[in-house]
Image (spheres, coloured by chain):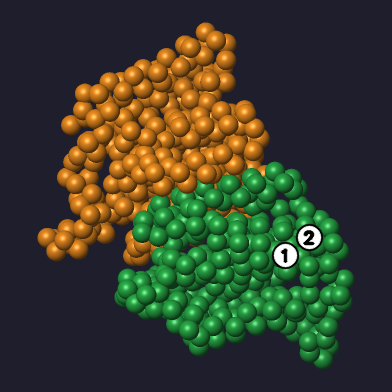
């Protein structure tokens, strides 16, 4: 159960996200709307990675591949005149799920360092594939002519788009909470702590892990669809391996094996980037050592620092 | 003509291969012995290239650059090990990936602050600008030939060092049972620091030789790092022999793929399809190879023996 202190923090965090558009409008700073929408989109990607990384112990170093696939699934149909968001987003989810199915089926045969490397290798393949397709912008990428058209919702309106992303994030957290506390989640977590035992008592852990892997890929694909709408641009650099590293950093920074942790991590990472880059163009020289310090000294991430941190769920 | 081209591209493949080996040897030693995934190994390659190039441009002597960059990068490597990485040996791979990712950001930015973001000017040392005859009728740039020779010499020295000397014996012993070696009175921490510094110097050697061929710029380390990771995974993590075989295989496959895949495809698919599919497939080739190797032999071609 979530402790009381933590519930208060969560509720406060949700309220902050809910009033961002009003505050941004009041201050006449639409930039903040943009920044927080970006944070939430990366939060969705980070939560999806945490489902397999934190709960399942599968260190996927190629998660940005699905981000890219989702982005292509929006921008490419748009390029050919198909602007329906329902079509684009369904395609994003299905295509990244299919990619995750193939990648997972091969990668999950290995563990440890080999698993890290093989997922990285697959992401690199997609990255180079994206670079080489000149019809879809190649290395430079291409502009998204028009944001996805949703029934009754106009994504070109920054506030509407913001609440769509917020609704998706909240829905994902709720579903994720149900999932990790369901039998499926229990099997995934148990496979992480002792896979041999799970197999001995009769679970096909491979199938469960593969299902989780595909689910995570599909959710991250949706984040990619949102991301390309956010930036109005498609570029293969969404799939660059440093992007996979960043998403992983968000998960660890926030606290892996929790649902709220990755959201905090995404917020902390992107806000830090924003603050530091306003202060100096060489912001990464501060961020880099900071990451090392977090790994060395704050092993449970930001979420572990919140009150009532004895509990691991969220 | 085609035979000449193939011979030249094979030499280029070998040259890329030995370059990858210089990186892979250090990385695989560090992984095999300290059980550390060091993504920042590419940063040491970059630091080596920058230091050598800066001294070369300042003094006009390439050799002076080499003599400065190797010990300097060795010292930087040992410093990084003592300050940060030493604490990560007992941690899981995830923590190591993250911390060394942080180090990459740091080093890239540090280099950009000192030398700027644009590529640093450099050139092939004037003594090695010519071509040499490697076979009757086959001429090859002298500089690249020297790289191949240096790389092969390093491989030989490493082999002797690891399998024939007392230090090498300690290194191998430390890899198979750290606690036992420490119990026998060996200063294992110092040994680890030395091995790490040595790996850093090898990376610097690769970087400073790569400088005149590729660009010297921030981020140059990551491009090769990913290829090196492919090498050590194919070769078998922790095995020097695997690193050598993997490096040559990856160097060859990558170079020959880029050179010949497009013409080869255009005979079967037609020129238009080959124009787009060729380069894409060529850059994906080594990753396909790695996925295939891992699928059939999850521990690589030459798995290191671990207790």
Q: Colour of chain A?
A: orange
Whether residue A251 can be seen here: no
Chain to which the residue tagged by mark 1 belongs = B
* Label 1 element class: helix
- Number of labels in the image equals 2
CA neighbours of label 2 inside 10 A, class few (<14), some (14 to 19), many (20+): some
Q: Could you say which disc has been placed on residue B55 in the image? A: 2
Whether residue A140 can be seen here: yes
Looking at this view, is B251 or B111 the one in front?
Answer: B111
Q: Residue at 29% of width from left, 50% of height from top? A: A56
Query: In whole angstroms, how far apart are the C-alphas of marks 1 and 2?
Result: 8 Å
Q: Quadrant of the C terminus of chain A?
A: top left
Circle nearer the N terminus (1, 2): 2
> What residue occupies the far bottom of the structure in this picture?
B136
x and y percentages locating residue A148 in the rendered image: 51, 29
Q: Could you say which disc has been placed on residue B68 in the image? A: 1
x and y percentages locating residue A282 in the rendered image: 64, 38
The image quarter containing residue A47 is top left
Q: Residue at 45% of width from left, 76% of height from top? A: B171
Mark 1–mark 2 CB contact (< 8 Å): yes
x and y percentages locating residue B283 in the rendered image: 61, 62
Q: Is B29 above or below relative to B132?
A: above
Chain to which the residue tagged by mark 2 belongs = B
Looking at this view, is A30 or A256 the one in front?
Answer: A256
Q: Colour of chain B?
A: green
Do the residues indicated by labels 1 and 2 lie within the same chain of the protein? Answer: yes
């Amino acid at each position: 159960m979530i402790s009381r202190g933590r519930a208060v923090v969560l509720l406060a965090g949700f309220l902050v996200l809910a009033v961002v558009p009003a505050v941004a409008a009041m201050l006449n700073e639409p930039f903040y709307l943009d920044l927080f929408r970006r944070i939430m989109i990366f939060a969705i990607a980070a939560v999806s990675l945490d489902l397999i990384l934190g709960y399942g112990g599968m260190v996927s170093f190629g998660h940005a591949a699905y981000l890219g696939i989702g982005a292509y699934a929006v921008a490419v149909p748009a390029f050919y005149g198909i602007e329906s968001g329902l079509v684009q987003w369904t395609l994003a989810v299905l295509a990244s799920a299919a990619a995750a199915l193939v990648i997972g089926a091969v990668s999950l045969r290995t563990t440890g360092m080999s698993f890290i490397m093989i997922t990285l290798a697959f992401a690199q393949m997609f990255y180079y594939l994206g670079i080489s397709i000149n019809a879809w912008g190649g290395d430079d990428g291409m502009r998204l002519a028009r944001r996805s058209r949703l029934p009754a919702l106009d994504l070109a309106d920054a506030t509407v788009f913001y609440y769509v992303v917020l609704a998706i994030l909240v829905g994902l957290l709720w579903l994720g909470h149900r999932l990790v506390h369901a039998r499926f989640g229990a099997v995934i977590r148990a496979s992480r702590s002792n896979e041999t035992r799970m197999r001995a008592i009769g679970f096909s852990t491979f199938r469960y892990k593969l299902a989780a892997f595909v689910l995570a890929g599909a959710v991250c694909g949706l984040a990619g669809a949102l991301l390309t709408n956010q930036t109005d641009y498609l570029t293969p650099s969404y799939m660059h391996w440093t992007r996979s590293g960043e998403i992983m950093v968000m998960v660890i920074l926030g606290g892996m094996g929790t649902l709220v942790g990755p959201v905090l991590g995404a917020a902390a990472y992107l806000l830090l980037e924003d603050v530091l880059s306003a202060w100096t163009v060489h912001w990464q020289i501060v961020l880099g050592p900071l990451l090392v310090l977090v790994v060395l000294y704050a092993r449970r991430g930001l979420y572990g620092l919140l009150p009532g941190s004895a509990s691991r769920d969220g | 003509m085609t035979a000449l081209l193939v011979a030249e591209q094979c030499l280029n493949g070998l040259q890329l291969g030995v370059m990858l080996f210089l990186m892979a040897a250090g990385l695989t030693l560090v992984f095999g012995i300290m059980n550390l995934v060091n993504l920042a190994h590419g940063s040491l390659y970059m630091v080596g290239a920058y230091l050598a190039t800066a001294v070369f441009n300042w003094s006009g002597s390439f050799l002076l650059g080499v003599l400065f960059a190797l010990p300097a990068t060795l010292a930087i490597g040992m410093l990084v090990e003592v300050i940060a990485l030493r604490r990560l040996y007992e941690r899981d791979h995830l923590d190591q990936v993250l911390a060394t990712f942080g180090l990459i950001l740091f080093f890239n930015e540090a280099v950009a602050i000192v030398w700027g973001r644009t590529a640093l000017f450099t050139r092939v040392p004037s003594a090695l600008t010519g071509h040499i005859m490697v076979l009757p009728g086959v001429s090859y740039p002298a500089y690249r030939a020297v790289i191949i020779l240096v790389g092969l010499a390093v491989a030989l020295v490493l082999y002797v060092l690891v399998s024939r000397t007392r230090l090498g014996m300690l290194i191998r012993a430390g890899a198979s049972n750290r606690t036992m070696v420490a119990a026998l009175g060996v200063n294992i921490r110092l040994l680890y620091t030395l091995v790490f510094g040595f790996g850093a110097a090898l990376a610097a050697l690769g970087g400073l030789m790569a400088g005149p061929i590729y660009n010297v710029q921030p981020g140059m380390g990551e491009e090769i790092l990913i290829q090196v990771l492919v090498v050590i995974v194919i070769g078998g993590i922790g095995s020097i022999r695997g690193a050598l075989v993997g490096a040559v295989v990856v160097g060859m496959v990558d170079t020959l793929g880029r050179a010949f895949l497009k013409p080869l495809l255009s005979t079967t698919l037609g020129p238009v399809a080959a124009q787009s599919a060729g380069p894409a497939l060529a850059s994906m080739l080594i990753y396909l190879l790695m996925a295939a190797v891992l699928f059939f032999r999850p521990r690589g071609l030459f798995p290191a023996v671990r207790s």
